Image: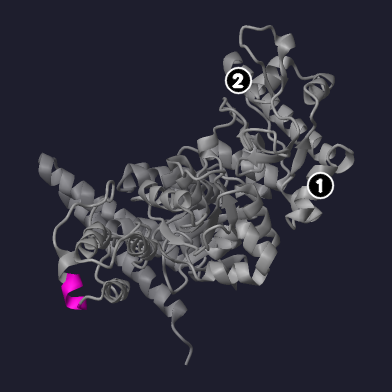
Amino acid sequence: MPRYTDESKDRVRQAADIVDLVSARTDLRRAGPGRFMGLCPFHEERTPSFSVNADEGLYHCFGCGAGGDVFSFVMETEGLDFVGALESLAQRYGVELEVADEDPAAAERRKRRERLLEVLERAASFYERWLWESREAEPARRYLRGRGITEETLRTYRVGYAPSAWDRLMNAGLQGGFTHREMYDAGLLVRPNKSRPPARLYDRFRRRIMFPLTDQRGRVLGFGARALGADQQPKYINSSDNEIYHKGRQLFGAHLARAAAARAGEVIVAEGYMDVLALHQAGIENVVGIMGTSLTEDQVGELGKLARRVLLALDADNAGQEAMVRAARVAQGRRLELRVVPLDEGRDPADIVTEDGPEAARALIERSVPFVSFRVERELATGDATTAEGKDRIIAALRPIFAQVPPSALREELLAHVASRLDLQPALVSSWLAQPGSREPGSGAPTAHRGEPGGSQAPPPRLPRQAPLSPVVRAERDFLVHCIAMPDEAEPLLASVPDEAFSSDGMRRVVAHLRGHLRAPAEGLPEDEPGLRRAIAALVAAADQIRPSRAALQGQLANVELAHLDRQIEAAKASGAGGIAELRARRERLVERRDMLIQQWLDETAPVE
């Protein structure tokens, strides 16, 4: 992993627009010069408590305590580490990063990865050109047009075509300065027998429609390829897993769906490439593809980075329904709300867009149901409700499903629906379903939260509210808030206060940072101290809300000094050392000064009659 210079980090911090980043996740409204407020994207709330300081590039939630700078926000919302967030922001805002001195081995690994990414990018461009410029690709263009996909959509997703020749891409890569080994390691070349020499290598993808598979930043990591001819098997192939590409981690189109999913608060999961393209073209841009019927844990993790609500728009056949059940098991405990888009068997989202139109597709998505409703309906549809034994088996199958649904209106609706379908008394059905029974494999605790397969209507767990501050910590915090609000007056005062006047190592670390960055608190924040970034963001947000006052600044400093004196007096008592009388005399004088300053501040803020 590369280590970038501090100057590079500062340039990215200055170039990144915190308002632009946050606005992709929640609506912001101006609350003052350089200050914005909105609903917190990190916890559910109805009254805005999320503050953004555009000038400093910081955010802070007064409700849950989330906070930090542009790097923190990208790390939290996109699931990246600091380097990933730095690289993503640099790419987004056009900042060139400079690599600091690194050991030769690390430099070699970084350069190798960059070369593989470069050859994959060149391959994507190569396939794109062949789709649009070659005579051979006319059948591919005709097929795509027949599926109702426009050129604009195809270019958005960088769809391409791999020519039928065995070595067309390989020769283009060699001419571009890449080696056989680099193209092989990137998954672009294969050989019939690994014992053969490199000269036997040939293009992995031939006579196929190519779909680039990217990371969340849009960098090409591999390809999915659809056969064009009926004689080609298998119909779909992917890049083989390698040091760049891992199929089980990929979501097709995630980089294009990210902003729309953040705005909508939900992401739609389709099975195939054409489903994603068709829905996107229909104006439903928060859609990704899983490229098959299995949803892996890594893919679920990637979905969670996009949105908390996941709508499964998979085929209604048995394989698709089993895939949804597996998806729920994989998603267990990840605080995701799973819903199911009702599709007719034999029709996929692309068919609906093509045959019924975009409005029909949007209406269908709006009719998504909680996952537990889908499970109940599935058991009712596949069971035998014509005999008593069949009804007993349905009840037994439903029991572990209902064990995950807490008391709610949804539960009552489902109970009534089951009773109606089985032609039984609702009270009997309720009592039978409430009896102990085996829970579903991997189902977790019976009491479900929203995001667990059975509890899609319950709200997600809230982040805890900030714990009340102790009087000592509040005094220290209020002093630092006034320091940020009045840097000219506060700078000499902050420099004069000894470190031991502050009650904790964490607070002393905040003070040390502010002593060097009082006029620009967001600058110089270390990448490995997220707690410090949150603390600075909270202080800056609080400073935005106060009326600066010299008397208040000095009064808060007196409170800090009083708390420090109290600790000194207690320590002297415990050790039996002398000087307690002098310490108490100093305390009395400080109390008088503090009270005078507070009265002066109250006089300054009193309304004029």
Instruction: Place residue 447 in its image quadrant.
Output: bottom left
Foreground tag (1 vs 2) = 1
In space, the residues marked 1 and 2 are separated at their CA atoms by 39 Å
- Bounds of the magenta segment: 425-430
Between 213 and 571, the one lying in front of the other is: 213
Between 139 and 387, the one lying in front of the other is: 387
Tell whether position 429 is magenta.
yes
- Please indicate, yes or no, whether residue 421 appears anywhere in the rendered image: yes
Amino acid beneath label 2: Arg
Residue 273 spot, x, y in % from top left = 64, 48
Marking on residue 141: 1
Residue situated furthest bottom in the rendering? 609
Instruction: Place residue 463 in its image quadrant.
Output: bottom left
Q: Disc 1 or 2, which lies upstream in sequence?
A: 2
Q: How is the image coloured?
A: one colour
Residue 373 spot, x, y in % from top left = 37, 66
Instruction: Place residue 251 in its image quadrant.
Output: top right
**Relative to 256, 332 lies left or right:** left
